[in-house]
Image (cartoon, helix red, strand yellow):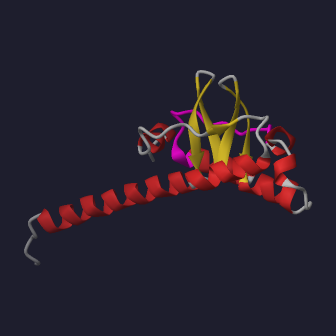
């Protein structure tokens, strides 16, 4: 299976999405909606200090009938983070996600935040890998001379 680095390279050139801990949950939700993402890194002076997800917003703000414009990201962000390294396999990362019951994991390289990986990214890469394997096997079967049956 391919590595997290391979999954991140599929999105080469994309900016790294982040919000500040001082931002309101409302502004974070608007940002996440505009970027079409389900979770975003929370950075302070370039350092990863947490992440905020749709689930955090729903359980900590909306379900409690709190005004999201009056709640800061730091009040609801997840700080106990499960981290992936770029050289981990996608399979290892998906196991981490399953164990932590999460769908997004920050990726760190030598202590530096380099991106966020989602379950969707992993499944997409896995699907692409399986498609390539089917094509390779199909080419092998149809390009290999058939032996006469005895």
Magenta residue span: 78-91
- Magenta stretch containing residue 23, yes or no? no
Indicate the position of residue 77 as horizontal and vertical percent values: 80, 43
Judged from this view, the residue extending furthest toward the front is: 69
Residue farthest toward the bottom in the current orientation of the protein: 150
For residue 39, above or below residue 22: below
Looking at the picture, tell me which residue is in the foreground, 23 or 4.
Answer: 23
Which one is in front, 131 or 71? 71
- Give the residue drawn at x 79%, y 35%: 22
Q: How many marks?
A: 0
Identify the residue at image location x=57%, y=55%: 36
Which residue is more in the foreground, 45 or 78?
45
Secondary structure, magenta segment, majority class? loop
* Residue 114 visible, this angle: yes
Q: Is residue 102 visible?
A: no
Q: Position of residue 81 (x, y in %)?
A: 74, 38
- Seen in the image, is 127 located left or right of residue 95? left
The quadrant where residue 16 appears: top right
Q: Residue at x 79, y 54 (%)?
A: 57
Q: Quadrant of the C terminus?
A: bottom left
Image coordinates for residue 145, horizontal then vertical, percent: 8, 66
User: Residue 3, position in %: x, y?
Assistant: 47, 40
Residue at point 69%, 22% (across, down): 45
Task: Looking at the picture, tell me which residue is in the foreground, 49 or 26.
Answer: 26
């Amino acid at each position: 299976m391919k590595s997290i680095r391979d999954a991140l390279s599929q999105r080469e050139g994309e900016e790294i999405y982040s919000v500040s801990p001082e931002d309101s949950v409302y502004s974070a939700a608007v940002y996440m909606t505009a970027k079409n993402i389900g979770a975003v890194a929370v950075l302070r002076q370039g350092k990863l200090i947490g992440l905020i997800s749709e689930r955090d917003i729903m359980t900590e703000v909306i379900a409690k009938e709190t005004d999201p414009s009056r709640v800061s990201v730091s009040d609801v962000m997840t700080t106990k983070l499960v981290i992936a390294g770029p050289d981990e396999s996608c399979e290892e990362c998906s196991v981490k996600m399953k164990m932590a019951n999460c769908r997004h994991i920050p990726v760190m390289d030598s202590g530096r935040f380099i991106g966020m990986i989602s379950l969707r990214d992993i499944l997409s890469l896995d699907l692409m890998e399986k498609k390539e394997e089917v094509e390779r096997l199909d080419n092998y079967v149809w390009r290999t001379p058939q032996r006469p049956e005895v």
